[in-house]
């Protein structure tokens, strides 16, 4: 019996093995090798036609905001590597929600390892609050944007729980 708390249909996971067969994992980007649209974004059929990088984000993190824009930190439209993908913010709306603790931490992110000292996290958080992009900090620290993103979010949560 599935637990009563199980809310999301795992239907999209059915397509995951088929999805990864179309990916060429290079040392940097993971390139989509099947069909692309006119803008160079990979296209994938998962019951309906979806952009491959969005599908990658969905199956890797298990969630996607309905209105969320999935952007590349590597500026490579055909790339589907999960840690090269980050949610767009729609301006300050999402940022504001995160700061106020209303946006849930994605379940799949909880096991990601910490890579920063407390001092570094504080610096990252402060720079993010003052408007610096997560992508530029990720480049500076040599980590994926998802890691920066998590550092920012997790610190916000911990602060709220003190
Ligand atoms: Zn990439």
Image (tube, helix red, strand yellow):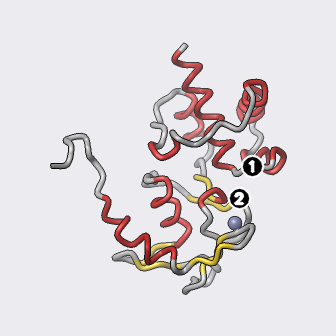
Quadrant assignment, res 125: top right
Q: Nearer the viewer, mark 1 or mark 2?
A: 1
Name the residue rendered at 52%, 65% in the picture.
Answer: 56
Name the residue rendered at 59%, 59% in the picture.
Answer: 82
Whole-percent x, y for residue 129 in the image: 71, 31
The circle on residue 16 is none
**101 horizontally vs 129: left or right:** left
Judged from the image, the secondary structure of the residue bearing numbered disc 2 is: loop
Is the residue at mark 1 in contact range of ligand 1, meaning its CB lies under 8 Å from it? Answer: no
**Marks 1 and 2, the one that precedes in the sequence:** 2
**Looking at the image, residue 72 lies above or below residue 63:** below
- The residue sitting at the right extreme is 140
Whole-percent x, y for residue 156 in the image: 59, 27
Split into quadrants, the picture shows ligand 1 in the one at bottom right
Whole-percent x, y for residue 43 in the image: 52, 79
Is the residue at mark 2 in contact range of ligand 1, meaning its CB lies under 8 Å from it? Answer: yes
**142 horizontally vs 144: left or right:** right
Name the residue rendered at 55%, 85% in the picture.
Answer: 34
Quadrant assignment, res 36: bottom right
- The residue sitting at the left extreme is 1
Numbered marks: total: 2
**Looking at the image, residue 32 lies above or below residue 55:** below
**Looking at the image, residue 86 lies above or below residue 137:** below
Residue position marked by numbered label 1 in the rendering: 143
Q: Residues within 10 Å of mark 2 (few under 14, many from 20)?
A: many
Which image quarter is the C terminus in? top right
Q: Are marks 1 and 2 in contact (CB under 8 Å)?
A: no
Residue position marked by numbered label 2 in the rendering: 73
Closer to the camera in the image, 125 or 26: 26
Whole-percent x, y for residue 45 in the image: 42, 79
């Amino acid at each position: 019996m599935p637990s009563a708390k199980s809310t999301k249909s795992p239907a999209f996971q059915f397509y995951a093995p088929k999805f990864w067969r179309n990916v060429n994992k290079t040392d940097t980007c993971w390139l989509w090798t099947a069909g692309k649209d006119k803008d160079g974004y990979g296209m994938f059929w998962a019951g309906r036609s979806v952009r491959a990088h969005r599908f990658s984000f969905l199956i890797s993190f298990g969630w996607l905001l309905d209105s969320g824009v999935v952007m590349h930190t590597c500026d490579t439209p055909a790339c589907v590597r999960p840690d090269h993908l980050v949610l767009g913010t729609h301006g300050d709306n999402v940022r504001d929600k995160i700061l106020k603790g209303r946006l849930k931490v994605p379940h799949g992110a909880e096991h990601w390892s910490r890579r920063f000292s407390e001092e570094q996290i504080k610096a990252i958080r402060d720079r993010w609050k003052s408007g610096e992009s997560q992508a530029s900090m990720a480049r500076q620290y040599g980590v994926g944007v998802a890691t920066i993103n998590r550092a920012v979010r997790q610190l916000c949560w911990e602060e709220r729980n003190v």
